[in-house]
Image (tube, coloured by chain):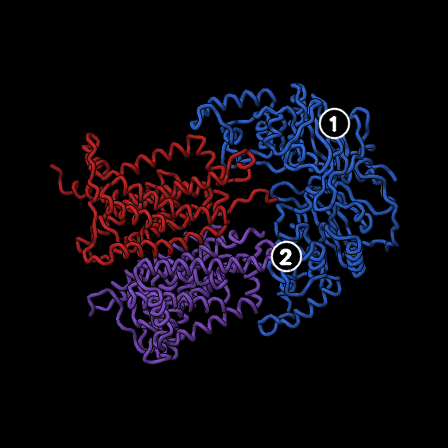
Amino acid sequence: MRRTIRTSLSFLLVALTVGGVSLLLIVMVGSSIPKALASFFNGILGSSYAFSEVLVRATPLTLAALGVSVGFRTGFINIGAEGQIYLGAIAVTALGMYAPSIPAPLMIILAMLAGFIAGGLWALIPGLLKAKFGLSEIINTIMLNYIAINLVGILVRTVLRDPSYPYPMSPTLPPSTYLPMLMTPTRLHAGFILALVAALAVYILMFRTPSGFCMRAVGLNPRASRCSGISVFRNLVLCALISGGLSGVAGVSEIAGLHHRLLEGISPSYGYLAIVVSLLGKNHPIGIILSAIGIAALQVGSMAMQRASGVPTSIAYIIMGLLVIMILARRELSGKER
Amino acid sequence: MDTPVIILITTFLAATVRMATPIALAGLGESISERAGISNIGLEAIMLSGSYFSFWAVFQSGSILIGILAGLAGGIAASTIHALLSIRCKADQTIAGLALNFLFLGLTSFLFLMQFGKITTIPSIAVIPRLRIPVLSRIPVLGEALFNQDPFVYVLIIAATVLMVIFYRTEWGVILHAVGENPGAADTAGIRVYATRYIAAIANGALGGLGGAYLSMVKLGFFQENLTSGKGYIALVVVILGRRNPFGVVLASLVIGSAEALQIRLQTLGSAIPSQAFTMLPYVVTILVLLFSFSKNTDPAALGLPYERNKR
Amino acid sequence: MTDIDKQFFGKPANSKVNLSVEQGEIHALLGENGAGKTTLMNILYGLYQSDGGSIELSGEPVTIRNPKDAIGYRIGMVHQHFHLVPTLSVSENITLGLRNPGHPFVKRRQLNREIRALSERYNLAVDPCALVKNLSVGQQQRVEIIKVLYRRANLLILDEPTAVLTPGEVESLFEVLRTLRAEGHSVIIITHHIGEVLSLTDRITVLRNGYNAGEVETARTTEEELSSLMIGRPLQQELPERPPVTDTERALVLDGITSEDGRLGPLSLTVPSGSIVAVAGVDGNGQKELAEMILGMARPASGTITLDSRELNRLSVRQRKDLGIGYISDDRLLDSLVLDMDLRENLLLSLYRNRKFRHHHLLDRKALETEAQKAVSEYGIKTASLDTAVRYLSGGNQQKLILARELEGNPRLVIASQCTRGLDIGSSEEVHTVLRNLRDQGCSVLLISSDLEEILKLGDRIAVMHKGRIVDVLENRDIDLTYMGLLMAGSGTERRQA
């Protein structure tokens, strides 16, 4: 009983600290708290458009975070979601540009597949390096991020370029690649549904199939897994493919549902945010959906807060970083339990 | 008297050194930290912090010295938080580093906008001028590149040399190494493991803060949101490429710096090759290097693992 | 040391233990696994505090609160697991943590000279500039000893020093210890090897189950006396009627297997179907390596492993388990359980491949639930609910879970290593019954245990293992326990006729 009380108190402490700091920051800017908070909540719940924006942002976060969570659970720390997202984007763009005549329903399926494979292969490189040679995937995945971002830069200036535009970007992709819209006139597209479906799929995979079970076992106790005949190598490789693949699909979704063309910077750190989302969501599909919506709301709300009350959007990053840090420190704050 | 080619090479080398300096400084700091067993991904946070606070201090006080001190303090603040999380709270060091990057990105942007958001012109400070070292700077080609630079470069050279001595020739280096490889053995031998790690973290923050200060005080003369834009992560790469050896880190930074300098040069020349091809190069090189030297995993054995005494 | 008491979680490790060592003496602390020897020495070295009793040095009572105090009293300890930094040199390891002259700049050459002088004085040839990771285990041990001597220890404690040495290295070590004695140092050596004790020491204190079992002068004692002191009187037990073991074609056959690091083999052993072969021996003589090699975690460097005439060498762990091999590891937390998973999922570790638990590629939860209930009732596993993480089960219940899982479905071969460790008598009895039933159904059971009682109760044949080899295989009929004790302790006495 005492343990539960202390745990609850520590969570309360975290919430209070984060909340308190946010309010403090608002005051520092010279804004009035009620006005700022009002504009924040207005920005996410005030209209259907506002709420749809939250979901639009939550879509790639959810997909990528699902990928990251599969990695985490198998013991594969995938910091490379950002790069994998871009790889997926490249895949769908290449498909749309060089095979434009494929009819609509088939096109989308192929695009998703291509994005999944592209992202999966991108994660497979550090995955193999880890499974075979024991090399740390943390630095490798970060470097592949930069390679991927630069790759996009090269491609939109060369093979994937739209010659009619002065800016480096791909031409608008054919409508067959478009994901159906869910709620005109908002930007909400079917990628959101895809994200929910993916969450369900990940749940089933990780918790209801033998493969998912093996992956979780490898993540929790690789040695016991080996003694039971579970191959750590195979599961790490499989996990890398799936983890990267999901982020790749996130990239496809952003292009096919939102931008409809490839350009630099389509991912405002979604890949890194996805790690935070996965962490806050305790690496569980349901938690991920909720925290993705939460983080997306934080970003959208902070943008509204900036427009209406002049509070800089950087407050969102402060809150996010502070939240994770407090959660990391929470055990220590509540008095050491174990 | 110099031919155009020589001038080209000299200016290119000088630019390389300038590009390499902030990364090298941060890399040196991280190599100290990693030798002690702490893997700090939060170099972006350290550099941003150093960069902003040094800028702010110079703007307020007009004194370069105070600016440098503020940069050091800013970097140390960031690395100390990471140290507390890693050592005291025994949290996952990678996640702590990532969270810090977000936190300080937001914090520095926020503070900057608060201070200077109303002003329409970009606030700037006087850039630290170059300091020409007599005699040495007369050496053809190299002299101009190495010894006609701002003081930070000289600090880098001195720091790298000092660290080489410390790592490989003093008892402090042995202690650092022991703490990162086998903290249990170090503990039994009477070494204070936690204290050593904290000190390493502080050194990391100081050097990284200095690297960040370089960006705002020397290179640009101003600050803006996300000034470092990934340099912190690149610093991690040079640590690995240089195998945590101070001279190796500096060398690796020069390689990366050269890619950057080349890229800028090509841009001004209007080359058709996208600059990204060159920005990409260092990372590709690193992965290839890692692939082909996989047999020698030189990571300290206890890297990233929190130390718990009496863990029987 | 007088009347030392020490308890761990209510179980006494030392009860009223007495030990006295003279100056310039090599004293052996002899006993089986778990007799309390290491605990006693850890108290002397300040790693533990005793619950009762006192310690005197040269007639003066002393309090030793931590190793620093012990070092202050000129006591040094060389542990079984070395505290060395592999990537540093010998010299750096020896001087680690000490304020050397010229700090922080190290006068390495001067220190190296001092170390070389020290090592020559005690016959501990070692190169101060060599990296520790390039040294053999025997050389590393010398570094540890020099470390201790460098800090001016008068009394040296060595914990199981010969466990990791080859016979040649053992002789070198003994030379060193004799030199130490000649120089006036006192040495306490913790060991369970009777033969070595007899050739080296001056006096011997024998511990058994935490008590003093005897204190003798080496010159006046014999192997037999020591063996019986260590093991105690042979216990009266009823040996149930055992069907005679007939060697059939169906058997697990190990032929000349060796491990790559040399810790195992050459070893040959046969476990016929329908029999229990018990491997007796002190922990650390290659039993774990043997078990893992049969399971498939390690490939033999040479030799073959066959089960029912089918060679296993190239099969993976999974393939071997599919053939029906159950494994009960001696380190269940590390090898057999995923602590944060619940009971059902831990059962799944072995069963996930089983068709019975799959339903169109999904896990059949109902079948799993039924199986879990069955396991709980059959083996009497006490748990609040099936959802609790296995981490919170008691050791005994965890073990029962592992048994339920590994022994399910009529396995062909069961490797059981320390399977009743941590179980109460009732549960141990149940486990024994299960193993016997398995045997009667034709299973080959390889039982590895350091519990002699258990070995004698269960084994149809008893193989004694020492330093990675099987030194002898005895039928479990009228066993000469003293002889067995000698075998386990590495004595080379010839077999006596019953």
At a point 41% along the width and 48% down the height, the residue shown is B290
Q: How many marks on residues?
A: 2
Q: Is residue C192 visible?
A: no
- Chain that is red in the image: B
Tags 1 and 2 on a common chain? yes
Classify residue A153 by image quadrant.
bottom left
Residue holding disc 1 = C20
The quadrant in which the C terminus of chain C is found is: top right
At a point 68% along the width and 43% down the height, the residue shown is C286
Q: Where is residue C344 drawn, in percent x and y?
A: 65, 65
Residue holding disc 2 = C391
Query: What whole-number distance in Å separates the C-alpha atoms at marks 1 and 2?
Result: 43 Å
- Chain that is purple in the image: A
- Chain that is blue in the image: C
Mark 2: secondary structure: helix
Front position in the image: C104 or B273: C104
